[in-house]
Amino acid sequence: MKMVSKIALTATLVIGLNGAALVAPAIAKKKEEAAPATPTISAPARAAAVEAQTALAATPKDLAKAETALNTLDTVAKSDYERYLASGLRLSLINAQTQGQPEAARIAALTPPLDALIANPATPKAELGNRYNSRAGFAYSNKDYAKAVEYFTKAKDLGYTDDDLLLNIARAKVDAGDVKGGIADLGAAVQAEKAKGKKAPESWYKYAFTRLGKAGDQEGADSWTAAWLTEYGTKENWRGAIYTFGFQGPAAAKYSKNRVDLYRLLWATKSQTGQREYIDYADAAINVGLPNEAKTVIDEGFANNSIPKGNITATEELTRAKTGIAGATSLAIKEKNAQAAPKGDLAQQAGDAYFGTRNYAKAIEMYRLAETKGAPDADRNNLHLGMALALSGDRAEAKAVLAKVAADPNKAIARLWTVFVDTPPTA
């Protein structure tokens, strides 16, 4: 991703200096082919332009000679085309003269000839888009975001193309204070790429959810995160998204009671790494009364060598889990009590207990029972039912159930699980 606050003072900035082609006569390939029309240039202007261009093309560049020749060209230039040549060559000269100087100084020096090129009617239309894009970068660097939007948009309208142009327009709008407008533009650009059968750059998604999060629009940030994972759902991205979503900053407190659901998603996306995450997952399960799940997690960690044999903390968690299981009602009794109960609270608890042992068929059965009897927390019941359906392989029904989750924090977690249902992690 190119940062618009940096000046791309390369061939991109100094293209369109057609002196070499226009100083020498055009030669037709065939006698019957007419030479392309060339703007008229006076002998003094041609001589000065040739001298300046030759000095700039030399190795090393002869900047003093080029400047003397350009001063002469400025004096003798009478037509728009001659002034176009003078401005273009001046831009190239200043670019060379200011190498190594601070960005602000370079912008101040390069802006006058660049503005002259933009204003000159002799500047080819095919070149103008590039010139406006460079000018937009200058405006952005100077924090003149409104002008940056204007110039980037003009470049786009003139047919200029660049992988980051639409992102740069959005970024300039956002930095000008129009966060929703900028991100909406970026969303439209993503859809336009999809319509062309292309995938928008990953940087667009990252920029969108980062800026929306900073602006306090967490629902918008979550939606863009989901869209990002749909297109770029590697295990590493899933892990980063889950941590950013629920384990860092203000979100850590917001989702403190839902941590086990996020650890379950880490496990489901196979993005769980290292002994710490197994141990933390087990701890979260015990804290919400699911010792069976805690034991399952620690056992898995030992079995796949994610947790070293003899790890003291993991062993302590396993002991806590076993103690909790010994002091709790068995799963069979939980199920029997749930079936006999007039309300759905025991069924919901039984569903959670079965979920923790990876027995999704039984978990689904209990959550459905809780639904018919009236679950005490319908959103949480639907969230867990949708998760169990997803992990059982019934993706269509999982999406339908997850869509019923109506309020945060469960709704936001349901969105992430829905992305998992739609697009499991890629390699």
Image (cartoon, rainbow, N blue to C red):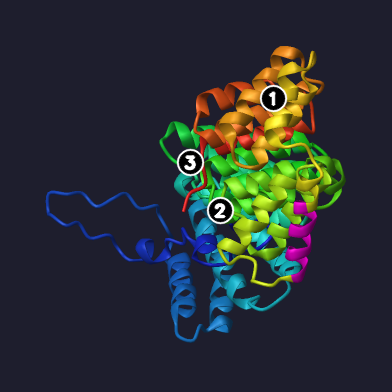
Provide the residue designation for mark 1: 382
Tag 3, which secondary structure? loop
- State which quadrant residue 258 falls in: top right
Q: Nearer the viewer, residue 69 or 418?
A: 418
Q: Nearer the viewer, residue 237 or 175?
A: 237
Residue 217 locus on image (x, y percent) = 79, 36
Residue 180 locus on image (x, y percent) = 74, 34
Residue 83 locus on image (x, y percent) = 54, 57
Q: Tell whether 326 sits left or right of 129.
A: right
Residue type marked 3: Gly
Provide the residue designation for mark 3: 159
**Residue drawn 76% across and 38% down?**
179
Q: Is residue 316 magenta?
A: yes
Q: Is residue 168 magenta?
A: no
Foreground tag (1 vs 2):
1
**Which badge, 1 or 2, comes first in the chain's sequence?**
2
Provide the residue designation for mark 2: 235
**Residue drawn 58% across and 43% down?**
229
Residue type marked 2: Lys
Tag 1, which secondary structure? helix
**Which badge, 3 or 1, comes first in the chain's sequence?**
3
Question: Dot 1: few (<14), some (14–19), or many (≥20) neighbours within 10 Å?
Answer: many
Foreground tag (3 vs 1):
1
Question: Where does the magenta region start and end?
Answer: 312-322
Residue type marked 1: Asn
Foreground tag (2 vs 3):
2
Quadrant of the frame with the N terminus: bottom right
Tag 2, which secondary structure? helix
Q: Tell whether 178 sits left or right of 9.
A: right
Q: Nearer the viewer, residue 185 or 378?
A: 378
Work out whether 396 lies above or below 269: above
Residue 120 locus on image (x, y percent) = 57, 49
